[in-house]
Image (tube, rainbow, N blue to C red):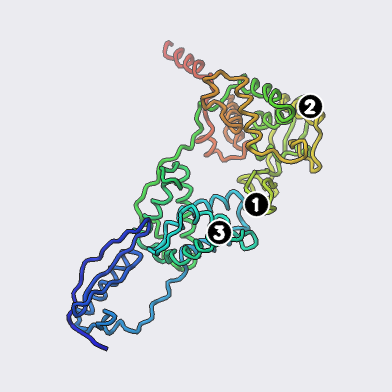
Amino acid sequence: MTTSYDVKFWETQRKTQGKAISFVVRWTVARKSKSKSFRTKGLADSFLSDLRQAAKAGELFDIATGLPVSMLNTEPEPAGPSFLEFAQTYVITRWQGTAPRTRETEVYALLSLIPALVDDVSGHPDDDELREVLRSHALLPKDRRTDLNRSGTLALGWLQKASLPLVDLQDPSVLRRALDAISVTFAGEEAAANTVRRKRAIFHHLLERAVEKKVFASNPLDTIKWKPPKAVTAVDPRTVVNPMQAKELLNAVPRVGRTRGVRLKAMFACIYYAGLRPEEAADLRVKNCTLPASGWGLIVLEKARPQGTKRWTNSGQTHESRSLKHRAKKETREIPIPPALVAILREHIKAYGTAEDGRLFRTSKGGSYSSSAYSYVWQEARALVFTEAQVNSPLAARPYDLRHAALSLWLNAGVPAAEVALRAGNSVEILNRVYAKCLDGQRETINGKINNALEE
């Protein structure tokens, strides 16, 4: 071994290749140049500090390796799992306890994070290809993974090699790289505030799991001074129809198409008169309904039937019954329904009966309506009722806006917020923040009341 005391150091250099960032430590031993790359500035600075301290202590440096004698033949500490490996474990361990939409939402956040948290490794695949490999293979349970072609196999191999060690997320610069990634869309545009906040929450929760596994003493994301964009949580009052407009829309629905519109009127009526979510109406069964010949009826909701992507559902189907939102399994919700809805449901059952499992709303072949199918009917009904300006406005732009109209109507009618929350399946806090809006067309009435008070 040939050694020397002739050692000089240079400042750490930052190197960027595509989206990958590395930090290079440069020094010379006996005038021979040496360098070493690190994924983070913290690791680079730590290594350079060790070299400087060895030189200051008068150690000899090996000319071949460039290292002080005390650092030769030392085994590096295990880096632990990569961010990719930990993200895979995170998704799989949460699979059984989460709803299909939650699974999809978590993976969607990781599609932004995993390709961003990589090292400077040659052969970087296209980001779209990396996301497809993650979406269809790497972030799914083994029995749900699609087979990869040669290109996909190479992309996954690159990602496994390049993914940063999870411990590197202690470095603030790495965390900011991750936050930058969730702040933009896959096309590089500014992401919606709600999307950014949701992805940041998932990232934070993943790191909490890392704290549980003793990878970190505390969540490193809590040390970053980063303010998420402000998200809009309140319902836009411009979307809320008044009772007359709601009735006109419901009467127009049967005029859309040959059979689809007439079969969907009662479903839309449940959203408006009972304040149901669309997925709750989709799973409504005859056993859930008390429909007297006159007077008020009752709906006892048991489950919802949300639409999802097949790869994320337990059954592999796009629709499957689940427990109610914000409710424990088998917990129900009672909703008194007015005579108008009772009559519509009685008429619907008389005309179309029920599916084999008792569901009220299904296609002519017994299936569930897709969100695109009933949204199309809704847009056609809007075009039949509204003026061109209203059609191009946010007014009742989605079927879900009927629920907003229902809850706003109940609140403006003087129903206590606690009772409205009970019927709607929300907390009072959320109700007051999100749904307590005035009806379309009430502004003149309210202004008149204020004007009368001013004139007294």
Q: Nearer the viewer, mark 2 or mark 3?
A: 3
Horizontal relation, residue 25 to residue 290: left or right = left
Q: Secondary structure at mark 3?
A: loop
Q: Residue at x 43, y 75 (%)?
A: 78
Asked which quadrant contains residue 168, the reply is bottom left
Q: For the residue labelled by badge 1, is the local secondary structure a helix, a strand or a loop?
A: loop
Residue behind mark 1: 313
Q: Residues within 10 Å of mark 2 (few under 14, many from 20)?
A: few
Pointer 1 or 3: first along the chain: 3
Q: Is residue 123 above or below residue 4?
A: above
Q: Amino acid at mark 1?
A: Thr
User: Helix, strand or loop at disc 2?
Assistant: helix
Tell me: residue 215, above or below residue 400: below
The picture places residue 448, in percent across and down from the top left corner, at 48, 14
In percent of width and height, residue 353 lies at 81, 34
Quadrant in which the N terminus appears: bottom left
Residue 429, horizontal then vertical, whole percent: 52, 39
* Residue receiving disc 3: 139
- Say what amino acid the circle numbered 3 marks: Leu
Crowding at label 3, few (<14), some or many (≥20) Cα neighbours within 10 Å?
many
Q: Is residue 86 visible?
A: no
Q: Quadrant of the C terminus?
A: top left
Alpha carbons under labels 1 and 3: distance apart: 14 Å
Q: Nearer the viewer, residue 370 or 401?
A: 370
Relative depth, front residue between 77 and 258: 258
Nearest the camera: 371 or 22?
Answer: 22
Q: Which residue is mark 2?
A: 347
Q: CA distance from mark 2 to mark 3?
A: 47 Å
